[in-house]
Image (spheres, rainbow, N blue to C red):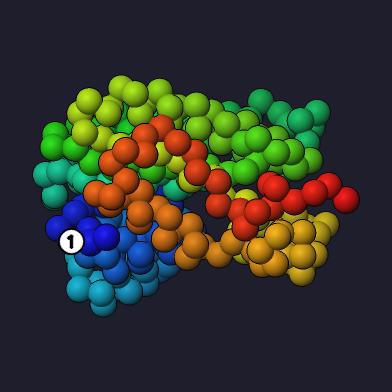
Amino acid sequence: MSLKGKIALVTGGSRGIGRAITLKLASEGADVIINYFRRTSAAEATAQEARSKGVNAHIIKANVGEPEKIDEMFREIEQKFGRLDIFINNAASGVPKPALELDAKGWQWTMDINARAFLLCSQRAARLMPKGGRIVCISSLGSRMITPIYTSVGVSKAALEALTRYLAVELAPKGICVNAVAPGAVESEALKLYAEDMSLPRLSQSTPAGKLVQPEDIANLVAFLCSDECSMIIGQAIIIDGGLSLAPMS
């Protein structure tokens, strides 16, 4: 599953799931471009760890919720690298409120970062993939299952998965495979925010696998979707949840 010689962009690639993806792609030989928004020190640390695996790593600060910053990021990528082989849409945000308490500002903020950015970044990434490539977006089980305060994020992730299908059909003739990965409960900082009323042991016990999904589990699946072996997987949203969505209701 070597990705040697490939150039990969990971948005939100310095921490959490994004960091795990960045390091996995680097371990498979890809040069990595790490997009981040706030913590330069975390981005530099992740880049240094990626370089220790024998690849090049470059960081770009940009809020993907702002179209002009997306344009600036891709101009820098084109000038520095000339092409892109892999684009991982991972950057995400959200306002943890139930639907009836969600205001227009929180809704727009979430949709801009989580859904609109995927469209705009994919448009720009595709232009840098004249010989084909891979696009993978990180969705969520919340796109189809309900968590009370997950409204804005869940709807934005459902939009991501719909857009994945549309992009997959349009870009397949160009040799660009587009897919999504939909994790269940992932042991991360975000989980503590959206599942504050449930302990980690309780969440683990509710999963048939008996444990929560780890960022590295997601990274392994993403790396596979970026490989040559997955050329016939097109427009899919692959669930990775340890069987959580199959567990019987109590």
- Most extreme residue toward the right is 250
Q: Is residue 18 left or right of residue 1?
A: right
Q: Is residue 39 visible?
A: no
Q: Is residue 85 left or right of residue 209?
A: left
Residue for point 59% across, 61% down: 213
* Residue 159 drawn at (x, y percent): 53, 28
- Crowdedness near tag 1: few (<14), some (14–19) or many (≥20) residues, C-alpha within 10 Å: some
Closest to the observer, 131 or 32 = 131
| Residue picked out by circle 1 | 4
Residue for point 65% across, 35% down: 144
Q: Quadrant of residue 191?
A: bottom right
Closest to the observer, 36 or 17 = 17
Of the residues shown, which amino acid type is indicated by label 1? Answer: Lys
Q: Is residue 81 visible?
A: yes
Residue for point 71% across, 59% down: 207
Residue for point 45% across, 41% down: 180
Quadrant of image for the N terminus? bottom left
* Residue 148 drawn at (x, y percent): 79, 40
Q: Quadrant of residue 146?
A: top right
